[in-house]
Image (cartoon, rainbow, N blue to C red):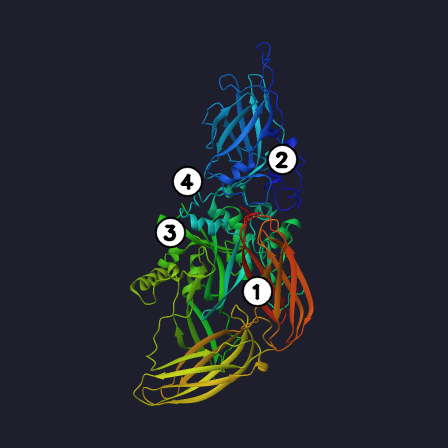
Amino acid sequence: MPHYDPCNRGQGRRNILVPCSNINDIDVAVVEFLKPVPRGPGPTDVISVKNVKMYEDRNKVAHHTDKYKNSSLIVRRGQEFIMGIEFSRPFSPQKDSVNIEFMIGSNPSSVQGTLITVSLNGDSKMSNWKSRVLDSSWTETTVAITPASDCIIGLFSTFVTVVTPTMKQRTKRNPKTDFYILFNPWASSDEVYMDNENERAEYVLNDTGIIFNGVVDNVSSRPWNYGQFKPGVLDACLFVLDFGKVPLQFRGSAAKLIRQGSAMINSQDDDGVLVGNWSENFSNGTAPSAWTGSAEILLSYASKGGVPVKFGQCWVYAGTFNTFLRCLGLPARVITNYCSAHDNMGNLKTEIVLDEDGRMDTEHTTDSIWNFHCWNEVFLKRSDIPPIYSGWQVVDSTPQETSDGYYRCGPTSVRAIKDGMLGYQFDAPFVFAEVNSDVVFHKRDKYGNTRIVSTNTTYVGQLIVTKSVGSSTADDITENYKYPEGSPEDQLTMKHAESRGMDRYQPSLLAIDVQLQVSANQINQGRDIGVTVYLTSLSTAHRSVKVSLTCKADYYTGATRSIFKTFTKTMNLPPSQAKQETFMVAGVEYEALDGGNSFLSFVACGLIENTNMSLTAMSTLRLNTPPLSIEISGTSEVGTDIFVTVSFSNTIGYDLNNVTLRMEGSGLLPLKTKEYSQIASGSSVKWIESFTPQYPGKKKLVACLDCAAIRNVCGQLDIDINPKNAGIN
């Protein structure tokens, strides 16, 4: 990747990652001589600057930035760092006037906060940055600098200026003294301050993670390498801001930066990082399920000058955005909402249309319920809303709906969502509907007339999870978003939401005296499935129920790929009795339609013939896939060769063609790829690679197998790398 240069910051979308060629045209970056005044001879013992030291190693440890694979100094705002200045003679505060200037952008200005001047002579009025002289020896003066806790984040250049009555002399531009400033969750004065060290370690410093997927009653997960410390990733994240023309003045505000960032992670309307693709054709890019992490995506985008990367779906957007956020110092995590509503009408009604026989009418159903949807949360204090609504904020870069003209979402307060306080910025009504929408079933007759036949107020947002702090288990955070269904607090929340224009279905149906449930038994891909319909009568009279069952292959977004089978059966219920019926689906009936997504859904509609009332139920099944295993051999020690073996056995029942295996380990192994033209049914493959760890600590190896017939086959292995010769006394 070309060297990133701060003098090109903010110049637009093109030609940003190039060496700065016009630095000598910038007034503040050259040696200046003031016009002489008639005061006699100038000073003969003017101090001059010989060298500037940034003490990179020392400062990085203090600022929790030593994991970044970047030779330049990286500090966090609101926290002191040390630098040294070598002069031609000892510095004297009484005799010498010396300033340090920090600049960012192509037209630095003190008014805009892009030119900061601090004095070594104790003048604190120059800026809201602080400076103090720590020590002054014969030739070197050590200075402590504290950037303002609300300063712009990004790459700054450093200049030292000597001022005399007759001239001003600045050091020339030296890339070795350029340094990065990031947000600071360790500083109580920073808006992103987080007071729990374990949470900072997880949400800022952890460069690997778990993203949860699957379905609500069979939660699964996949590993993800965030890789925010990898070489070039920090520059790539800053490139995203530059390419998106994010004003430098916005980059001191976490809320403004993440709102702009949520638009730039997708390419929908601004040539952002990722191209979305929810089809089955990924031939001219990488399938979303094949990615093992974010670094490859961000580095490709930056190195190609802003060419969007193909392809992404919600977890890829969320994983990449998480890397972007953590890399810039923002505490962030990936959230998974199960049964997530996407309502096209902006209300609290997700509407599903059935035909007159109770079967799914996919042509007239425009709303969808995603089996799962991933977004991000960022932790920050917001000054634009009441303090109670600071803390975790929802941001979503998956392009679903526009907000202020761009495909983006948030930040919006999680607590405000829970309380139904939807008047606070940004996009609270959309997020509220994702977790609270009612499912409303309509029946449509052959003349196009529709009527509401049933509703479900608990299906959407059943479970919301994120990775637990310090472990790979799921942390159930549903209560952060929702009060218990039907509780007084929940009812008050809904009143608040309705007062903000969130239209809900107002039930007027008579009580239904039969209950309906449906479930499918989870089995390996390619095997038969049993779908069981349960009916329970609450009536003291006999009930006859005509059940229609629609079996369909879905995308994970809930959109129907194909209806592959329907059943119809009349079930007779004695008074106050229960009955069940199991319908069998053969593997050959759906395997050609699955497309590797492994989601099947079953929609049951029952017509009570005695009362002419209807009831509905839904169940989604994610088919199991064969495991991908990772094993290592050798001593887990810095500088020692380790062999890793990735193994897979095809137990699906049919051949897999054009298979791609990817493997990487943050701090262990760069991305490796292996192709197989075919893995025959019943056969196994083993892939062996070696690596030599360079750094001690807890690491994670991640591998993914992908082909058109099977997706999201992932494996992971946690490794604890010991320091070199750790076992020698």
Calculate the distance from the C-alpha at mark 2 to the C-alpha at mark 4: 30 Å
Local secondary structure at mark 4: loop
Q: CA distance from mark 1 to mark 4?
A: 41 Å
Q: Earlier in the sequence, mark 4 or mark 3?
A: 4
Asked which secondary structure carries label 2, the reply is: helix
Q: How far apart in space, not on screen, are marks 3 and 1 (Cα)?
A: 37 Å
Image disc number at residue 714: 1
Q: Classify 10 Å Cα crowding around label 3: few (below 14), some (14-19), many (20 and above).
A: many
Q: Which of pointers 3 and 2 indicates the residue nearer the eye?
A: 2
Q: Secondary structure at mark 3?
A: helix
Amino acid bearing label 1: Cys
Instruction: List x then y, in percent, for residue 264.
Output: 56, 52
Residue 156 visible from this viewpoint: yes
The mark that comes first in sequence, 1 or 2, is 2
Relative to 339, does residue 527 appear above or below in the rendering? below
Packing grade of label 1 (10 A; few <14, some 14-19, many >=20) is: many
Circles 1, 2 touching at the beta carbon (< 8 Å): no
Question: What secondary structure is found at the residue carrying circle 1?
Answer: strand
Question: Which residue lies at the image location 58% right of the left edge and 38% below the top edge?
Answer: 105
Question: What residue did someone put label 4 on?
Answer: 189
Left/right placement of residue 25 relative to residue 75 reads right
Residue 142 higher or lower than 636, as above or below? above
Q: Which of the two discs, 2 and 4, labels the residue nearer the N terminus?
A: 2
The residue closer to the viewer here, 327 or 541, is 327
Nearest the viewer among 202 and 621 is 202
- Do the residues bearing badges 2 and 4 touch, measured as CB atoms within 8 Å? no
Residue hosting label 2: 175
Question: Which of the two labelled residues, at mark 3 and mark 2, occupies the earlier sequence position?
Answer: 2
Q: What amino acid is found at the position of numbered circle 3 in the picture?
A: Tyr
